[in-house]
């Protein structure tokens, strides 16, 4: 539970995207459809099929301050509303000030420029109301409770991290390191910007099975396979996330800001339940680097991956389907 | 002075009412029969002195003869005529048409507004105004009203119905209605007025709107083919809403009948078969003036009432604008019970007076439900735009014994349906766009409706281009992602949610304008209007397979509507969702399984797990030495054994590890004990309070510039 040493507002700022346009190499602007952003998903997808070569994007924003922010008797002066676009992968941070729509209004608006070259994937937009409180300038009196995601590559405004799925023939791939795994149906590669699942197209019928959308027994096998694969993937990405942590001078691990951080936030509550994720990370890190406890933790990591992949549900459905088909055979 | 009707027709009617013929009048006036005949045919007018004689002969005053705005009271008095029982001994347990509806003021609003829209006077371009007045009367007002409707004449009939109440539905409803009136001493009158409508024109018996509403069942006589109704069922909702089965009508006609327009009054009663005294009665009864032309002068017909009578019947109209007033006597709203059960508990807690315990006659809830229905079903008809006036204006008010209970409320569609009205207005004003790029825009698409050939022949008669409007929506617009479909009468026929949209589509509202609503230039608008109207069930709340559709077109005709829906959904999807990427590898399911969705994160994150004590409140201040002084409340779960917890105080930072402060003191205050910085909770306690202060020497920065974080960690700490 948090406590601030000055008066502030409890309710969050509501931040909305109102427009998005791309600046093309020939200096023209292309206004994107409203379907480029999603309010429920709080995401802007700037990747559009026709324009891969845009140089910058302008995102129109409007923010509504919580009640009391612009009241005459508010205990602060010099209220400003700032929007920050932060990218954990490239460590680029852009701040812009919004303009109050009318004097005394709760509505503020403006826009933020997103430079294509500053980002590789997703960046996060948040708004803060900043003012001078008790003679201390620059104190935050209210902020957004949930960030907006700006994805410079996605073509669908679905927030959240999506791991990559690629289909490759391992034996004859130009990526020579894959040749060693020619007999594996799939492997996980966590070395890229985003972890990728490489599906071996040399295993005949495997890719077709993955794409299948048919019903019946085939479907159940398909689902089991998907959960099996994602259990693998989640275990692998968790290991690579905790195996690659930066630490402070006193040895405490720093929460990663890229996909590793998101994977950890997703899985740590199952790996070390009952504590704050920061604390959970500290415990996991201590066990991994310390003398004891790493082996014991494997069960919990596996459990977290199984839960995340939804294995129990897929398994019980497959079992029920099997029973039904058996009964059908005997009847 | 009001100008009455011509002398001739007036005199003819007075003679008829008085049961006299021309010869008899001539005798009394000591004139020839030819002279009287000349007056009646309009060939001459009596001398002023003769007027006095005529007045005396008719048993009225000279003023009435001069102004001729009302009928003389000379004839048979206004009374109830009960249709006699059938010769064959058949019995009706009530009006079958009224059975189709439950008492529901929302259905009433829908049907009456639809009728008023259909009867709108189109020449002047003005909207038809519909006003609902809910009026609860008690005490003297109720007594006076009962006298006006000749309750004493009706009492035996109601008693007869009550006796048989155990056997059929209508009887039970009526029995309950009468009992409510006497036990609680009150009656709810629901009045529906329309202005700038045609009124009940036409003869008392022959084809015409009057007869269609007052005399007949299941007959629809609508003014044009774009009309909303087609079943003639709508009017039955008036009687269905009355617990007493009684509706009184006062109409101002747009076309004179018998040379008059104002205050054509009649009442109609719908009761089940009954036996009263020696006679048996089939069911319906009419309040009116006995018609001397009918056998035995028993059948009653509408009469031209004077202002006093109209006033006493609560039927006074605001102006002489044509239109009709329906007064539903003993209105009740059974349907409100369904929804009000849930929030009634809350109402009771707020200390609402116990008098309004009967939900079906709660005038405030009737008011609210009427407003709701009007906003929901008629927002489009009430929307103006460009040079276009709205088709309809509505208002609702609630009175008790003439005193205002809820102020008259003009229904403003922009208030209840901001997104949809914005869409329609943009269409009227021509400000629609092709693509949605900013909030507040309205996108327009045309959607084809292929009309089949009539009579079961294969092939397409023509393609109607319906207009689809899509705009972004806010919270006030109700269920998001819906399409409201309408025809020329601008009543919402169908509300459907667009299926198969991808995750994360922004909230929107869509409007589908078909038939003449799609604009004058839309091809095959009239045909589409006719086709879709035939596809509506009596409730007018969807389009689909109906008997009429099958008979007039073919049994597969409804597929055309299904295809329209598909086209609409596809067009909506194209506007609000990004096209699916085609080159997806590895199947959608795997992709989904490998996504960390931010919305899901909150649900899967378990803060403390079940059965752990949780921080429930924190109060902190900075002490004189610059230390943080805290008081914290802990909520304890109901478990047998509570684990020990360690309070940890940290400073919040934007990134990196949070510095941990040391405690200078920790004090248990309630429900717990403190032991070496560890909290031990008292068994059975539900909450615990502890306080503490930090050690200033462990603070890395000035306290006033820090944010405090207090955590409870399971166990004894590290």
Image: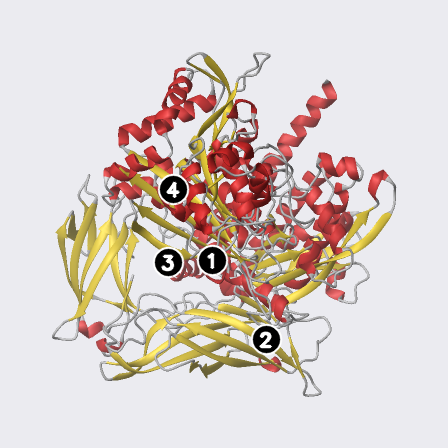
At label 4, counting other C-alpha atoms closer than 10 Å, the crowd grade (few under 14, some 14-19, many 20 or more) is some
> Whole-Å distance between the Cαs marked 1 and 3?
44 Å
Question: Quick one: SS at disc 2?
Answer: strand
In-front residue for pair B421/A253: B421
Give the spatial CA distance, label 4 vs label 1.
39 Å
Instruction: Tell which subunit mark 3 falls on.
Output: A
Task: For marks 2 and 1, give the CA distance.
Answer: 29 Å
Residue B416 tag number: 1
Contact check, label 1 and label 3, Cβ < 8 Å = no
Which is more N-terminal, label 3 or label 2? Answer: 2
Q: Badge 2, how many Cα within 10 Å: few under 14, some, many 20+? A: many
Where is residue B253? Give x, y as percent: 54, 49
Q: Nearer the viewer, mark 4 or mark 3?
A: 4
**Residue visible at 39% across and 62% down in the picture:** A278
Dot 1 and dot 3 within a common chain: no
Quarter of the image with the N terminus of chain B is: bottom left
What is the distance, in whole Å, between disc 2 and disc 3 at their CAs? 36 Å
Distance from disc 4 to disc 3, alpha carbons, whole Å, reads: 79 Å
Tell me which corner region of the image, top left, top right, bottom left or bottom right, holds residue B207.
Answer: top right
Q: Mark 3: which secondary structure? A: loop
What chain letter is assigned to the residue under label 1? B
Q: Which residue is mark 2?
A: A20
- What is the chain identity of the residue bearing mark 4? B
Seen in the image, is B667 located left or right of residue B104?
left
Task: Pinpoint residue B505: horizontal percent, then vertical percent.
Answer: 59, 59
On the same chain, marks 2 and 3? The answer is yes
Labels 4 and 1 within one chain: yes
- Return the residue at label 3: A276
Q: Secondary structure at mark 4?
A: helix
Nearer to me, B333 or A57 = B333
The label number, if any, that marks residue B309 in the structure image: 4
């Amino acid at each position: 539970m948090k406590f601030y040493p000055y008066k502030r507002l409890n309710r969050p700022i509501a931040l909305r995207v109102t427009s998005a346009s791309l600046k093309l190499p020939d200096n023209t602007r292309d206004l994107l459809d409203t379907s480029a952003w999603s309010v429920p998903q709080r995401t802007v997808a700037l990747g559009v099929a026709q324009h891969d070569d845009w140089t910058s994007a302008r995102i129109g924003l409007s923010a509504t301050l919580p009640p009391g922010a612009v009241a005459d008797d508010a205990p602060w002066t010099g209220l400003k509303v700032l929007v920050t676009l932060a990218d954990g992968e490239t460590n680029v941070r852009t701040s812009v000030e919004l303009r109050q729509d009318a004097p005394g209004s709760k509505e503020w608006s403006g826009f933020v420029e997103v430079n294509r070259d500053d980002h590789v994937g997703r960046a996060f937009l948040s708004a803060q109301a900043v003012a001078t409180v008790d003679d201390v300038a620059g104190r935050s009196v209210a902020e957004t409770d949930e960030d907006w995601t700006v994805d410079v590559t996605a073509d669908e405004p679905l927030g959240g991290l999506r791991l990559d799925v690629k289909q490759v023939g391992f034996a004859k791939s130009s990526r020579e390191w894959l040749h060693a795994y020619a007999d594996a149906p799939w492997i996980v590669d966590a070395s890229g910007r985003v972890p990728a699942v490489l599906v071996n197209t040399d295993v005949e019928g495997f890719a077709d099975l993955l794409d299948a959308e048919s019903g019946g027994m085939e479907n159940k096998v398909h689902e089991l396979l998907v959960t099996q694969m994602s259990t693998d993937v989640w275990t692998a990405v968790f290991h690579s996330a905790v195996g690659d942590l930066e630490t402070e001078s006193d040895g405490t691990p720093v929460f990663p800001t890229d996909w590793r951080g998101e994977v950890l936030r997703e899985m740590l509550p199952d790996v070390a339940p009952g504590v704050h994720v920061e604390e959970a990370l500290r415990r996991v890190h201590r066990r991994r680097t310390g003398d004891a406890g790493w082996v014991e933790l494997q069960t919990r990591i596996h459990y977290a991956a199984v839960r995340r992949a939804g294995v129990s549900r897929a398994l019980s459905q497959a079992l029920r389907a099997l029973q039904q088909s058996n009964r059908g055979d005997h009847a | 002075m009001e100008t009455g009707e011509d002398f001739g027709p007036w005199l003819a009617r007075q003679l008829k009412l008085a049961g006299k013929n021309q010869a008899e009048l001539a005798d009394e006036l000591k004139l020839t029969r030819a002279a009287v005949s000349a007056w009646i045919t309009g060939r001459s007018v009596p001398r002023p002195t003769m007027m006095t004689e005529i007045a005396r002969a008719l048993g009225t005053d000279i003023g009435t003869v001069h102004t001729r705005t009302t009928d003389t009271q000379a004839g048979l008095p206004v009374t109830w005529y009960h249709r006699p029982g059938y010769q064959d001994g058949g019995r009706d347990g009530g009006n079958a048409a009224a059975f189709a509806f439950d008492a529901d003021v929302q259905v009433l609003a829908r049907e009456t507004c639809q009728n008023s829209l259909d009867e709108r006077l189109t020449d002047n371009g003005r909207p038809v105004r519909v006003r609902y007045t809910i009026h609860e009367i008690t005490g003297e007002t109720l007594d006076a009203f009962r006298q006006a409707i000749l309750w004493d004449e009706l009492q035996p009939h109601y008693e007869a119905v009550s006796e048989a109440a155990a056997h059929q539905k209508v009887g039970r409803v009526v029995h309950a209605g009468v009992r409510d009136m006497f036990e609680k001493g009150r009656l709810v009158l629901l009045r529906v007025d329309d202005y700038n409508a045609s009124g009940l024109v036409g003869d008392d018996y022959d084809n015409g709107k009057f007869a269609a509403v007052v005399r007949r069942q299941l007959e629809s006589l609508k003014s044009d083919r774009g009309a909303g109704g087609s079943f003639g069922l709508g009017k039955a909702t008036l009687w269905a809403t009355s617990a007493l089965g009684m509706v009184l009508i006062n109409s101002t006609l747009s076309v004179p009948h018998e040379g008059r327009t104002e205050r054509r009054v009649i009442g109609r009663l719908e009761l089940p078969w009954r036996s009263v005294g020696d006679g048996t009665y089939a069911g319906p009864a009419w309040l009116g003036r006995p018609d001397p032309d009918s056998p035995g002068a028993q059948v009653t017909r509408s009469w031209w009432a004077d202002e006093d009578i109209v006033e006493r019947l609560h039927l006074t109209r605001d102006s002489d604008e044509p239109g009709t007033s329906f007064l539903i006597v003993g209105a009740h709203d059974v349907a409100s019970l369904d929804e009000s059960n849930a929030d009634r508990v809350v109402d009771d807690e707020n200390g609402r007076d116990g008098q309004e315990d009967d939900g079906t006659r709660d005038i405030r809830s009737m008011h609210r439900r009427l407003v709701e229905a009007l906003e929901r079903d008629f927002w489009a008809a009430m929307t103006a735009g460009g040079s276009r006036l709205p088709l309809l204006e509505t208002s609702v008010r609630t009175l008790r014994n003439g005193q205002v209970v809820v102020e008259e409320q003009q229904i403003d569609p922009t208030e209840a349906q901001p997104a949809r009205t914005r869409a329609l207005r943009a269409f009227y004003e021509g400000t629609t766009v092709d693509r949605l790029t900013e909030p507040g825009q309205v996108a327009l698409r045309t959607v084809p409706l292929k009309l089949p050939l009539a009579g079961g022949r294969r092939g397409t008669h023509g393609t109607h281009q319906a207009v689809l409007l899509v705009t972004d929506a806010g919270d006030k617009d109700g269920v998001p992602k819906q399409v409201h479909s309408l025809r020329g009468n601008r009543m919402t026929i169908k509300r459907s949610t667009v299926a198969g949209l991808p995750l994360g589509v922004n909230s929107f509202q869509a409007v589908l304008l078909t038939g003449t609503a799609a604009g004058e230039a839309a091809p095959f608008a009239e045909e589409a209007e006719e086709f879709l109207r035939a596809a509506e069930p009596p409730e007018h709340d969807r389009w689909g397979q109906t008997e009429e559709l099958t008979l007039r077109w073919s049994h597969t005709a409804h597929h055309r509507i299904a295809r329209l829906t598909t086209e609409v959904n596809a067009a909506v999807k194209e506007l609000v969702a990004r096209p699916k990427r085609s080159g997806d590898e590895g199947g959608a399911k795997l992709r989904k399984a490998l996504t960390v969705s931010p919305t899901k994160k909150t649900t899967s994150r378990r803060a403390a797990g079940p059965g752990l004590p949780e921080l429930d409140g924190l109060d902190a201040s900075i002490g004189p030495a610059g230390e943080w002084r805290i008081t914290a409340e802990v909520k304890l779960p109901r478990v047998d054994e509570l684990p020990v917890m360690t309070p940890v105080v940290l400073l919040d930072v934007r990134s990196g590890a949070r510095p941990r402060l040391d405690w200078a003191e920790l004090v248990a205050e309630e429900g717990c004990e403190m032991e070496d910085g560890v909290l031990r909770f008292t068994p059975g306690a539900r909450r615990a309070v502890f306080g503490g202060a930090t050690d200033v020497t462990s603070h890395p920065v000035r306290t006033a510039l820090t944010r405090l974080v207090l955590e409870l960690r399971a166990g004894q700490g590290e």
